[in-house]
Image: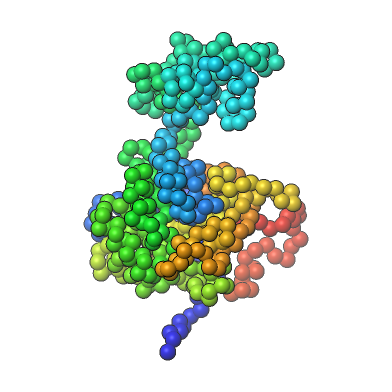
């Protein structure tokens, strides 16, 4: 006979945290959100790959490109570049993140010495950047001949056809530094010489990077940024259970820090085969997460198969219609609570701590705090990140409101059939996701900082200064549907009522 769970499965909106005692030390600025991304053994000094914030971005075409990956790593989290693209393109995205040196910019505005003011103005309009490197061959790495900045010409005064060499600041008058100059030293040179840009050149005088005064300041402001030992941003990438023998080597070669098998259903032989192949070829040096599962059995299966972390969630994603189309899944809160218990038991038995990630269904910021309190080590978000400037999708205006496009990997638009592969299929047979819009929400940094400030202040209300402490001290209660109504503003007429927008 089929197995019936005694309790209904619940989601985040059905829970609240009950405050605990908070001492005078419980202030948001004292809270650490550090969390392990991959498994580690009891007694090990620390986890081999930790994040500074408990957020990763979804393995989706409409979410995790290289731009978002850089922006999120700057805040202390990790993006998983989407795998539903060619191996070459995915590896190129990883490479772009890894070669992006915080503070060192590979010049994207370059012209040859034959260019005119007209070309300068056109390039400036296209890139939005006013500093243009003049190199012998017009490439970002060519021999540096001079720099053109806004102060070098006067629009409507300098003739349109004036050659750049007649008004650029030539190399003889530029302050430059060797390519391996530390960012700290670059900053000192910038200050000592009262300049805004410092080109770094190699022994032959070829341009390598430009360091900008304003970037150094913002770099210093990103106290949480997540860097590898070479000071490059940490980045992840999605893989599937079909072409791993080709995709994994290409991603490893590109410098990826961590992989994740992207699948709607992870309790499968395909996942253990994929992890097995990685272990056989790379041992423990290549880190790989797996999922998604929604119960203890699924967790144990993946933990034993060697997963470095396990992702939880089936059918809870904002663009996901798996539950409607296939009738499988589980309320996200119940799934997280059960898997967290299994993770702790597995740790007691084996001494191996396998971090777990709650994936999908985060609507309000406080859902992140609930997921952590229920035992998740970090959360994966799609809709949340799709709203920001840095997501790879179009910003459009609909009924006077700015929106960003957001579509599921199981939608006809993404056609990521490997994510739903049960062996044998080579196409998406039916849709499990939708194509949609989400309200535009500005730069990622602002959004993430506001969200995490809320998370930290709730943690303080629970008397917790770290995620493990929250998990120990949290008191959670199920709420009735009438008390959910009580939780919002009610029985008042709102001034300036605007249509309600998700999140926040
Ligand atoms: P959300 O953050 O609620 O938008 O959910 C994002 C998650 O939804 C992803 O990390 C993934 O697990 C799941 N997803 C992605 N595409 C689809 C689909 O088309 N059904 N679902």
Residue under the image location 41 percent in, 68 percent down:
423
Residue 322 in the image: above or below residue 38: below
Q: Position of residue 427 (x, y in %)?
A: 50, 63
Residue under the image location 53 percent in, 68 percent down:
429
Q: Is residue 148 visible?
A: yes
In this rendering, would 443 be left or right of 27? right
Q: Position of residue 327 (x, y in %)?
A: 53, 76
Residue 269 in the image: above or below residue 22: below
- On-image quarter of the C terminus: bottom right
User: Which of the pair 69/375 is nearer the observer?
Assistant: 69
Residue under the image location 63 percent in, 57 percent down:
436
In this rendering, would 424 be left or right of 436? left
Residue under the image location 62 percent in, 65 percent down:
487
Q: How many marks?
A: 0
Q: Position of residue 62 (x, y in %)?
A: 55, 52
Colouring method of the image? rainbow
């Amino acid at each position: 006979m089929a197995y019936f769970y005694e309790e209904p499965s619940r989601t985040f909106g059905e829970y609240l945290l009950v405050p605990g005692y908070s001492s005078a030390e419980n202030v948001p600025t004292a809270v650490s959100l550090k969390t392990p991304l991959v498994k580690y053994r009891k007694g090990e000094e620390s986890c081999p790959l930790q994040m500074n914030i408990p957020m990763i971005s979804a393995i989706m075409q409409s979410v995790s490109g290289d731009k978002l990956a850089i922006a999120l790593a700057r805040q202390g989290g990790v993006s998983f570049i989407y795998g539903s693209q060619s191996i070459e393109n995915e590896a190129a995205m990883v490479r772009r993140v890894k070669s992006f040196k915080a503070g060192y910019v590979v010049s994207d505005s370059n012209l040859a010495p034959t260019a005119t003011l007209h070309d300068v103005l056109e390039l400036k309009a296209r890139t939005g950047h006013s500093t243009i490197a003049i190199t012998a061959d017009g490439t970002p790495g060519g021999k540096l001949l001079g720099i053109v900045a806004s102060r070098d010409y006067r629009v409507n005064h300098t003739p349109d056809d004036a050659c750049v060499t007649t008004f650029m600041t030539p190399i003889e008058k530029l302050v430059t530094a060797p390519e391996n100059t530390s960012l700290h030293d670059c900053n000192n040179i910038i200050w000592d010489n009262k300049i805004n840009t410092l080109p770094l050149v190699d022994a032959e005088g070829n341009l390598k990077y430009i360091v900008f005064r304003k970037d150094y300041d913002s770099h210093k402001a990103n106290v949480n940024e997540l860097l590898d030992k070479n000071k490059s941003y940490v980045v992840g990438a999605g893989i599937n259970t079909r072409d791993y023998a080709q995709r994994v080597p290409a991603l490893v070669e590109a410098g990826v820090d961590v992989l994740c098998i992207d699948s709607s259903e992870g309790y499968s032989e395909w996942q253990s085969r994929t992890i097995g192949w990685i272990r056989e070829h790379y041992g423990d040096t290549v880190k790989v997460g797996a999922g998604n599962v929604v119960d203890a059995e699924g967790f144990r299966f993946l933990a034993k198969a060697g997963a470095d972390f396990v992702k939880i969630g089936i059918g809870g994603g904002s663009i996901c219609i798996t539950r409607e189309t296939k009738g499988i899944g589980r309320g996200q809160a119940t799934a997280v609570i059960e898997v967290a218990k299994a993770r702790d038991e597995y740790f007691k038995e084996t001494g191996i701590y396998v971090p777990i990630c709650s994936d999908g269904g985060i609507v309000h910021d406080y859902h992140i705090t609930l997921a952590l309190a229920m035992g998740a080590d970090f959360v994966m978000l799609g809709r949340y990140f799709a709203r920001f400037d840095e997501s790879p999708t179009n910003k459009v205006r609909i009924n006077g409101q700015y929106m960003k496009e957001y579509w599921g990997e199981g939608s006809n638009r993404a056609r990521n059939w490997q994510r739903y592969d049960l062996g044998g299929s080579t196409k998406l047979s039916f849709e499990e996701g939708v194509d949609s819009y989400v309200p535009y929400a500005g730069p990622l940094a602002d959004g993430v900082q506001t969200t995490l400030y809320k998370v930290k202040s709730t943690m303080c209300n629970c008397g917790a200064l770290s995620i493990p402490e929250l998990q120990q001290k949290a008191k959670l209660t199920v709420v009735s549907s009438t008390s959910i109504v009580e939780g919002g503003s009610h029985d008042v007429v709102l001034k300036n009522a605007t249509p309600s927008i998700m999140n926040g």
